[in-house]
Amino acid sequence: MRVLLSNLAIVSALSAPGIAFAAAETVTGTVKTYSPLAMTPTLSDGTAYMLPKGFKDPGLKAGEKVSISYDMVGKKHEAKTVKILQQPQQS
């Protein structure tokens, strides 16, 4: 019985970090550039996010404050959701 419980504890400990990494991360920033052909918004910090195929553009433009939920796929930031938080002010 002890062997079974210790094996379950080991399996649980090894699988828990994998679950933590599967969660999407969220970042908030200002759009520096947006390329509709490449489906890539780049934030003011220089990080580019690849949008999924079939993404419905909510009207992304430079200067808009956005919240992007993304996953890391290799070394690329793959966006899951993009929400516009604030419209840019007109001068």
Image (cartoon, helix red, strand yellow):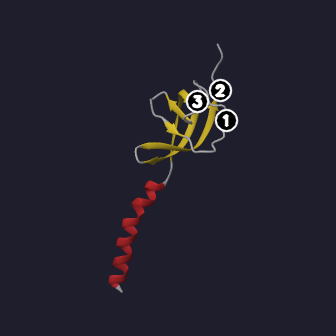
Q: Tag 1's secondary structure?
A: loop
Q: Please tell me in which quadrant of the rendered image residue 4 appears.
A: bottom left
Image coordinates of residue 50 in percent, x first then y, are 52, 40
Give the residue type at disc 2.
Gln
Spatial CA distance of label 2 from label 1 is 12 Å
The answer to whether residue 19 is left or right of residue 41 is left
Q: Please tell me in which quadrant of the rendered image residue 87 appears.
A: top right
Residue that carries the numbered disc 2 in the rendered image: 87
Residue at image location 41% in from the left, 60% down from the top: 18
Q: Tag 3's secondary structure?
A: strand
Residue that carries the numbered disc 1 in the rendered image: 58
Of the numbered discs 2 and 3, the one sitting upstream in the chain is 3
Of the numbered discs 1 and 3, the one sitting upstream in the chain is 1
Residue that carries the numbered disc 3 in the rendered image: 65
Q: Tag 2's secondary structure?
A: loop
Q: Nearer the viewer, residue 44 or 50?
A: 50
Between disc 2 and disc 1, the foreground one is: 1
